[in-house]
Amino acid sequence: MDFKNKLTNWYSNNKRDLPWRDTKNPYHIWLSEIILQQTQVKQGLPYYETFIKQYPSVFDLANASEEEVLKLWQGLGYYSRARNLHTTAKYVAFELHGKFPDNYKDLLKLKGVGDYTASAIASIAFNEVAAVVDGNVYRVLSRYFGIETPINSTNGIKEFKALASSLIDKEQPATFNQAIMEFGATQCKPKNPYCMVCPLNESCVAFQKNLIDSLPVKLKKTKVKTRFFNYLVCIDEDNKTVLEKRTSKGIWQNLYQFPLIESNKSLSSEEFHLLNLENSILSDVAFDYYLYNTEDKIHKLSHQHLYTKFWIIETDKLSDNAISIKDIKTYPVPVLIGDFIEAFNF
């Protein structure tokens, strides 16, 4: 029995029961694929169910505000996915009259949809022979065929896409694509894969040559940048605080945060006291302050590590753009800010 048949047989006996596998609705499949980009199923599933309940159709999602979408997305990270999700929903609803493109080439034109996502939607929703290549697929193919080409190199991307395209079941592209992704997610896992009970172990190069831990090969990541954030958590006598919207491109665009001062190192209370606050929310305000967390809260992003301190600022009266503290949880915020809000409890 060949690779293709063993894989699909394994899938029929071992696949997880997931809601997006019970439909050919391109809206549902698109939504699940966007959520599952850089997110594991166990984390993404509750978000998928919430989005479907809140926005049953692409028109419902398109008619929501970006702020509402970002709030519902809060905690999933990589927020550009949510902004692209909303942009594409509006395009499909208002420009394409609610009808998703039905082929790989046109799906690729949608914002936030790359090669993998277009292939997944095209094959699963429309049965197009379009091979998917995601992290799970890279791992399965590199191990089974013993391929040492780095998966994040230009040559690697082309090589693995060509290989996946040559292997896909042309009669059942949706089943094959879901089978190889599921196999990588639950059987051929990154660490401690179930090799001894693997249906492919007799012909798996990595298993036969003891290369499981060294494949797939990946080029070193971009150097991680260290940043130091100081958040000003303002509280006045009217139980108001201040949130600001991050409008610049970069991390957390269009999410809300407490007023931020970025420094070139972690600040002590004495060093904070010496800061020039003329251009901050505190420029014309008398205030007392204390440091909430004496140790930096370290928040790790893909290419940045944020060393964060929260400074509690107590003052008589804040500016007119202050908001009631009781409304603070209605704003979409990064998980770093959300965790603080929950812990501080105002």
Image (cartoon, rainbow, N blue to C red):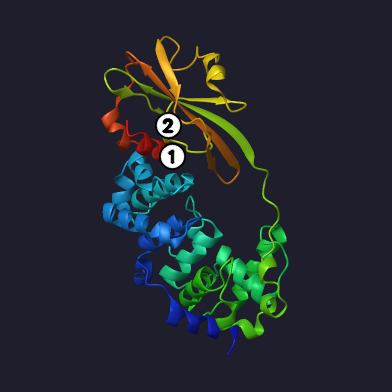
Residue 231, numbered circle: none
Left or right, 10 with respect to 17, comes to: right
Task: Report the front residue among 111 and 328.
Answer: 328
Q: Would you say the residues marked 2 and 1 are in contact, meaning their CB atoms lie under 8 Å apart?
A: yes
Question: Is residue 202 at least partly visible in the picture?
Answer: yes
Q: Which kind of residue does numbered mark 2 sit on?
A: Gln
Rendered location of residue 247, percent (x, y)? 46, 31
Rendered location of residue 302, percent (x, y)? 58, 46
Residue with the mark numbered 2: 257
Question: Is residue 215 at least partly visible in the picture?
Answer: no
**Quadrant placement of the C terminus:** top left
Spatial CA span between label 2 and label 1? 7 Å
Residue with the mark numbered 1: 334
Q: Residue at x 38, y 70 (%)?
A: 21
Q: Earlier in the sequence, mark 2 or mark 1?
A: 2
Quarter of the image holding residue 46?
bottom left
Task: Report the front residue among 316 and 65.
Answer: 316
Does 36 appear above or below 141? Answer: above
Q: How many marks?
A: 2
Q: Which kind of residue does numbered mark 1 sit on?
A: Pro
Left or right, 161 with respect to 253, comes to: right
Rendered location of residue 84, percent (x, y)? 45, 47
